[in-house]
Amino acid sequence: MNEFFILMKPELMITVIIFILLFIKLSGTIKNDLLLLIIQVLLLLNFLAAFFFNTSGILFDGMYHTDELIAFQKCILNFGVYLISLLFADWFMNTEHLSEFFLLMLSSLLGLDFLISSGNFLMFFLSLELATIPLAAMSNFDLEKKISSEAAMKMILSSAFSSGIFLFGISLIYGATGTINFTELPAQLNGNFLQILALVFVITAFAFKLSIVPFHLWTADVYEGSPIAATSFLSVISKGGVAFVFISVLYKVFQPMHEVWYNIIMLLSIITMIVGNLFALRQQNIKRFLAFSSIAQMGFILVGVSGNSQQGTSSVVYFILIYILSNLAAFGVAAAISSQTGKEKIDDYKNLYKTNPVLCWVMALALFSLAGIPPLAGFFGKLFLLNAGASNANYGFILFAALNMIVSLYYYLKVIRSMFMDKNENPLEKINIHPSTKFALIICSAGIILAGMLSWIYDYIQSLS
Amino acid sequence: MNLLWLILVPLLTSIAVLLVQKKQQVKWIALSGATFQLVLAFILLFVYKNEIASGNTDSFLFQQKYEWFPSWHISFHLGVDGISIAMILLTAFVVIAGVLVSWNTEKMTKEFYFMLMILSFGAYGFFLSLNLFVLFFFLEIAVIPKYLLIGIWGSGKKEYAANKLALMLMGASALVLVGMLGLYFSNSQRTFDLIELSQSEIPVYIQRICFPLLFVGFGVFTALFPFHTWVPDGHSSAPTAGSMFLAGISMKLGGYGCLRVAVYLMPIAAKEYANIIIVLSTIAILYGAFATMMQKDLKYMNAYSSISHVGFVLFGIGMLTQTAITGAVIQMVSHGVMTALFFAVIGMIYERTHTRQINEMGGLLKVMPFITTVFFIVGFCSLGLPGLSGFVAEVTVFMGGWEHPDFFHRFATVLACMSIVVTAVYILRAISKTAMGPIKESYLNLKDARWNEKLAAIILVTGILAIGIAPFWINDLIKPGAEIIMQKLSMPH
């Protein structure tokens, strides 16, 4: 019983928070600012608790397993959710159903936690659904906007489709091997046609969740239509969580078939980088822009995934930590601007530096980090992904990925140019930033600057994986 | 001597610049930081000379090694030899002159000096590092400051030029990165360390793949033909100090990288590809010289002439003889100081006449004797007048090229020599059009150089004369470094 509490601590913590929120909701009306404060404190506690009592162990006959790396991955996700609760304070204040939003978000987080810990495809499927379905409701949260409902509709349809494909893949695996248990599967895999087909279906389902080309079509519309808090959860936390699982499924379960999936991953990575980058070039809406850039980033993560080594795992986990910091900072600035002025176009940012120098520098830090410019953390993250990928000695692929960084630099520079260089007599007015947003942006900026150069962060992840 | 100082001083200066509010404070902090860098560079020079005089024969002195990313075997490894000290001196000279000439920057002064200091931080780190990863880190640090310097404080087609420069240099870095990873995975120790790599046998087929990647990657920084196209736009759109840094320091990063990483680590491939390098650099020398003749804008003129002059660096490296390599390094230093001074003078003239068109000027010698005299000196240095640094560097390169007895090398040397005639044509024409002749009435009230401009010019002229009149000290400084590279090249395989 004691073991149960210790091993399932992250999930239990989130469940407790969900119940507290429910009770608060039921016990009457409470003002948004107080409620938000309570939520922030609870999420902070949840984040801090993730540092203690992390051991490895197995529960429910292998359905659930955890170890220190998994605990760290959950910790990263908790951290991201805490940052979200701080960053979008303006939007949270004005929303009518604040507690419901967090209920949905935490349910999805709970699903992700179970997903990371699952040791069986059945458990895996259940938690994937738990992680996905609340997302559709979150996308629909701007109730008065039509575009938001459209986003939710697209989200739910595409995730239903991907679930179907995934279930089909699982049934093929069961048919081919007679087991769906992660520990028993590798011994049964021999790379026959049925198993390859199953592998393709499973990867397809993952590709839907990670919005990897050609399964990315829902991404931009959903990102644009959803409220920005939901968008950032979707693009950062949910993707990060699924990427963690993707790695462990490929490296542990499908390890005997790594030659097969290596080629698939390489192909997906190449087209994802091309399409993500090319589409990002033309975007004007900052949310769509970040959506396509995140597609390109996913292609980059696949370079590290293709490494198939301990370095592959650690570089992906490290990159996702940095990706969370950088992307959330960018979303935070965009949200601060759009919640006060309603402007979401890159052209609206022209000469923003004149009125909001600090916001511009935070945005610049975030975008340069995403583009992989030293000394920011993104540089180290991308370099280690490339290093991990290069261990297969496939230099053409690595060169292609490195050259893609140029294209991505071009569109990140477009935003920078708009903010710092373009002439504009009437830039947007001075933006008042909510104190908690300010705090979160400081955390993100410090993280972006330091997380790379302080090498012990990477070494810690490396020692866990 | 603790080499970390040379990295920390620019970094701390840039942070200090951010922390203060008043423009005056910003300027003085930047100036004192730059002075401190110059003093440190001289201290380093003397300490190094003492060590060498006392019989120290290590290839790299004052080495420092700190673990950085142990899981990738990446350590923060610093060390210097004569070549890097020459480059560090050059950097220190250009930085202090750059700070001085931009004394009157009104627009976002704080950010401007911050960018300059970050640029110098990158340059020092690059020249000091003995680990490919650290080297790459510092190489990339400088890209964004360049972009912002051109884009925010530049003139003309600045956005276009800034974008072109950032993207081309980023592409170059991508090539360098892949070449670097190739070297990393080719050796059994999995190391980025320059010294360990130079001791390990890098397989020939890896050399054949990685040498072009690294050489072209670094070559883009040094305006290797046909990847020179960022140079004219970038240099002419940048603010004065930005052009000085770009042409004076940033282009030298590439030359240093070609020599230190590509040639030093992969001698076999270097010999195989040497002829291609010579052909490309000869084209760059001639093309740059002839293109300069067509320019009407002073900044464009110097930008194209930089392509031609920097071609000598790659030309010298491609010749692979000790004299030629020494000449290439001297040319890097000489051209760095000279072109920085050139851009500084052009900036001073432009600030007064508000034009850079050669045809619109005339008779400036009468109203601004100091600036025009410096313009003469730097012009003569550029066309290779004996007694100034350009002559020393180019003659050394030509002698190195002539050491090869065969037709190909000698023919290339003759072709490269011919560019000097062309240089004389455009320099003399530019000088006579701007300084001599009747003066426009509107120019009659123009003032001569202020104290800061005079100081900057004097510092850089000192550099030109120090190499031009007494070349032996820099020759002695570079010699041990060049010898080590030659040892690697002459090893039997």
Image: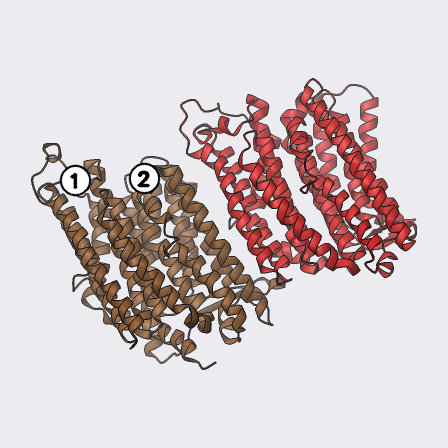
The brown-tinted chain is: B
Name the quadrant of the N terminus of chain B: bottom left
Query: Type of residue at label 2?
Result: Gln
Of badges 1 and 2, the one in the foreground is 1
How far from the left and from the top, in percent, is residue A424? 41, 25
Q: For mark 2, name the chain.
A: B
Secondary structure category for the residue under label 2 = helix
Query: Type of residue at label 1?
Result: Asn
Specify whether B252 is left or right of A330.
left
Question: Is residue A172 visible to the viewer in this orientation of the structure?
Answer: yes
How far from the left and from the top, in percent, is residue A84? 67, 34
Secondary structure category for the residue under label 1 = helix
Residue nearest the observer in this picture, A88 or B436: B436
Residue at mark 1 to residue at mark 2: CA–CA distance? 37 Å
| Residue linked to disc 2 | B24
Specify whether B427 is left or right of B104.
left
- Identify the image's colour scheme: rainbow, by chain, secondary structure or one colour: by chain
Chain A tint as drawn: red
